[in-house]
Image (cartoon, helix red, strand yellow):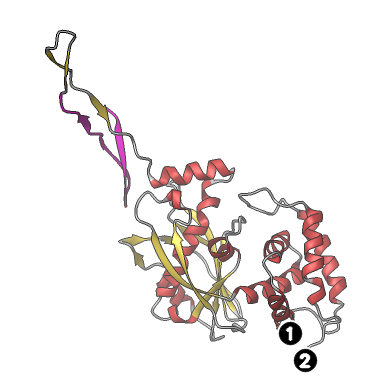
């Protein structure tokens, strides 16, 4: 007999599939006499579990299950943090995971970046209390791991969480930073978990999260690109370039300047030369540093887009006002 599989908190359980018997039917033969047809029976089709759906989706896209499901896991971790009694109302989110969840970026990230909107420091125990809370009848986080405390942030490099795919725990990284308060009011967005409709074996879960405004996130990404020249930063800037309006560019010019003033570049830095250095650095790793569920664009197209979109917005040389 076939088996159906049911997703439970403890894993996947099995039970016999029901056999469905159709009522007997009658027909008339060539002599006009009624003749009874035999019973027909079928077995119910097996319904794939959510774990299997996640595994199949990852396999079809050519990435590991842990890479594919991290964005949905990070959304749940963000929800845990916003429910924290001491810090929940102080946080807004940004970074690659947010781009995947709300902007539709195909790049997959293992990091969750939280910003303390007041610019004031938070404590390790406050973050741990939020992460280890129960949600939906169980704990998502298995182990918070070590913390790397800094003057302006708390970093958790080895957080171990429960997976959707059932293929073992997934490792993520979390940073909670109070380096600078947001320049614009955060946006409140609704996120569906799982983010792909076809992966929802049951009812979806909707999460409301405060996120840094998109135009401010792009300005921070320009600063990050200038300071470290990573291929991930180049990809994110290229992904956002096509959706910028004339008004966005005007606001972005001012926001980039303000972000640079709180950054690490020295006074008098030639930003155009620094931009070329960052392009060269990103090209060296392209596209090996990307975990992505689509074909990455060719580097010449990325370089052209970044030069045309962002380089003209830099006030050169760099001066703090």
Of residue 250 and residue 79, the one placed in the foreground of this image is 250
Query: Is 11 on the left-hand or right-hand side of 166?
Result: left
The residue lying at 82 percent from left, 74 percent from top is 312
Residue 10, given in percent of the width and then of the height, sits at: 31, 49
Q: Is residue 22 magenta?
A: yes
Percent position (x, y) of residue 205?
A: 38, 61
Label 1 secondary element: helix
**Whole-number angstrom distance, CA of label 1 to CA of label 2:** 8 Å
> Tag on residue 139?
none
In which image quadrant can residue 20 be found? top left
Quadrant in the picture for the C terminus: bottom right
- The residue closer to the viewer here, 158 or 195, is 195
Q: Does the segment drawn in magenta span residue 29?
A: no
Which residue is depicted at the point 71% across and 66% down? 241
Q: Position of residue 277 (x, y in %)?
A: 84, 66
x 53%, y 60%: residue: 172
Magenta segment range? 1-24
* Local secondary structure at mark 2: loop
Quick one: which residue is furthest to the top in this view?
31
Q: Which mark is residue 321?
A: 2
Q: Residue furthest bottom?
A: 321
Question: Do the residues bearing badges 1 and 2 touch, measured as CB atoms within 8 Å?
Answer: yes
Secondary structure character of the magenta stretch overall: strand
Q: Position of residue 122 (x, y in %)?
A: 50, 81
Towards the viewer: 319 or 293: 293
Residue 97 at least partly seen:
yes
User: Which residue is labeled 1 in the image?
Assistant: 261
* Left or right: 89 in relation to 256: left
Residue 284 visible? The answer is: no
Q: Which of pointers 1 and 2 lies earlier in the amino acid sequence?
A: 1
For the N terminus, the image quarter is top left
């Amino acid at each position: 007999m076939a088996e159906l599989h049911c997703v439970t908190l403890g894993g996947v359980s099995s039970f016999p599939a029901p056999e469905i018997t159709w009522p007997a039917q009658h027909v008339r033969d060539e002599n006009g006499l009624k003749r009874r047809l035999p019973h027909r029976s079928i077995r119910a089709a097996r319904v794939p579990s959510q774990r299997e759906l996640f595994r199949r989706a990852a396999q079809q896209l050519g990435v590991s299950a842990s890479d594919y499901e991290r964005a949905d896991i990070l959304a749940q971790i963000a929800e845990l943090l916003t429910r924290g009694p001491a810090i929940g109302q102080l946080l807004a989110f940004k970074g690659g995971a947010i781009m995947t969840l709300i902007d539709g970026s195909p790049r997959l990230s293992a990091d969750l970046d939280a910003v303390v909107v007041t610019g004031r420091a938070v404590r390790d125990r406050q973050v741990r209390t939020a992460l280890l809370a129960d949600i939906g009848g169980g704990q998502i986080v298995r182990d918070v791991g070590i913390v790397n405390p800094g003057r302006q942030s708390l970093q958790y490099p080895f957080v171990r969480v429960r997976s959707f795919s059932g293929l073992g725990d997934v490792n993520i990284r979390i940073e909670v930073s109070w380096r600078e308060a947001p320049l614009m009011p955060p946006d409140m967005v609704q996120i569906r978990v799982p983010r792909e409709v076809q992966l929802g074996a049951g009812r979806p879960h909707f999460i409301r999260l405060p996120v840094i405004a998109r135009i401010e996130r792009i300005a921070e990404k320009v600063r990050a690109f200038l300071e470290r020249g990573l291929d991930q930063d180049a990809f994110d800037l290229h992904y956002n370039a096509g959706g910028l309006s004339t008004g966005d560019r005007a606001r972005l010019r001012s926001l980039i300047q303000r972000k640079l003033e709180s950054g690490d570049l020295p006074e008098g830095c030639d930003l155009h030369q620094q931009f070329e250095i960052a392009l060269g650095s990103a090209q060296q790793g392209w596209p090996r540093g990307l975990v992505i569920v689509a074909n990455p664009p060719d580097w010449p197209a990325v370089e052209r887009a970044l030069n045309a979109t962002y380089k003209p917005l830099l006030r050169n040389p760099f001066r703090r006002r």
